[in-house]
Image (cartoon, rainbow, N blue to C red):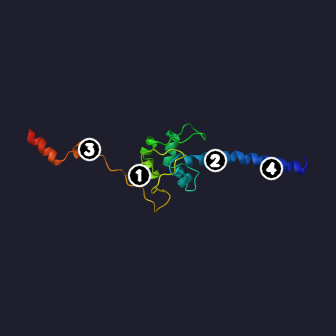
């Protein structure tokens, strides 16, 4: 094999290896467009490393376990009210609140919701406040109503 043939074989192998390695990276980065403000947060939305890649954070694990259309690189994130209502990281704010879509109504292709985002890797970023608690039946009843009920007896 001549030197030129060896160089050609090497370049062909390098090109094939590059294309194989690039496919998974492209497949994963596509998921940032499948969640509201994912293009703003980038890979750190689902990965513990702020630069992306590596171990998944709580939100990434939640998506991988229950909110992909299918497992593997071909899976699409199933963003909607259910995923938005959960609190993957347990900080008291829902996934939807943290991503600017509390109701989970954002659809892929829509503009990003506006508002402040929670950036977990930024020490100065604070999570949104948790939603107000839903009053219990006892809390919903006013003192005047209690007195009226007592007076009726």
Q: In the displayed structure, does residue 126 sit left or right of residue 8?
A: left
In 3D space, how far apart are the residues under numbered discs 2 and 4 (Cα atoms)?
Answer: 22 Å
Q: Which mark is residue 116?
A: none
- Provide the residue designation for mark 2: 26
Precedes in sequence: disc 3 or disc 2: 2
Q: In the displayed structure, does residue 133 sit left or right of residue 78?
A: left
In 3D space, how far apart are the residues under numbered discs 1 and 2 (Cα atoms)?
Answer: 31 Å
| Name of the residue lying farthest toward the front | 110
In 3D space, how far apart are the residues under numbered discs 3 and 2 (Cα atoms)?
Answer: 48 Å
Q: Nearer the viewer, mark 1 or mark 2?
A: 2
Q: Residue at x 80, y 47 (%)?
A: 12
Image quadrant of residue 34? top right
| Name of the residue lying farthest toward the top | 70
Residue 113 spot, x, y in % from top left:
47, 52
* Within-10-Å neighbours for mark 1: few <14, some 14–19, many 20+: few
Precedes in sequence: disc 2 or disc 4: 4
Residue 28 spot, x, y in % from top left:
60, 46
CB under 8 Å between discs 1 and 3: no
CB under 8 Å between discs 3 and 4: no
Q: Nearer the viewer, mark 1 or mark 3?
A: 3
Looking at the rendered structure, the secondary structure element under dot 1 is loop
- Provide the residue designation for mark 1: 91
- Provide the residue designation for mark 3: 136
Residue 5 spot, x, y in % from top left:
88, 48
Looking at the rendered structure, the secondary structure element under dot 4 is helix
Q: Residue at x 71, y 46 (%)?
A: 19
Q: Nearer the viewer, mark 2 or mark 4?
A: 2
In-front residue for pair 92/108: 108
* Within-10-Å neighbours for mark 2: few <14, some 14–19, many 20+: few
- Provide the residue designation for mark 4: 11
């Amino acid at each position: 094999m001549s030197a030129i043939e060896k160089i050609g074989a090497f370049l062909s192998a390098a090109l094939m290896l590059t294309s194989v390695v690039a496919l998974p990276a492209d497949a994963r980065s596509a998921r940032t467009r499948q969640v509201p403000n994912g293009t703003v947060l980038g890979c750190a939305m689902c990965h513990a490393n702020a630069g992306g890649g590596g171990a998944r954070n709580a939100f990434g694990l939640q998506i991988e376990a229950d909110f992909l259309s299918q497992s593997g690189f071909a899976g699409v994130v199933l963003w909607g009210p259910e995923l938005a209502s959960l609190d993957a990281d347990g900080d008291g704010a829902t996934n939807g609140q943290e991503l600017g879509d509390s109701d989970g109504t954002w659809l892929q292709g829509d503009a990003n919701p506006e508002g402040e985002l929670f950036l977990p890797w930024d020490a100065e970023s604070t999570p949104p406040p948790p939603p107000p608690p839903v009053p219990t039946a006892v809390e919903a009843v006013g003192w005047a109503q209690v007195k009226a009920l007592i007076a009726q007896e």
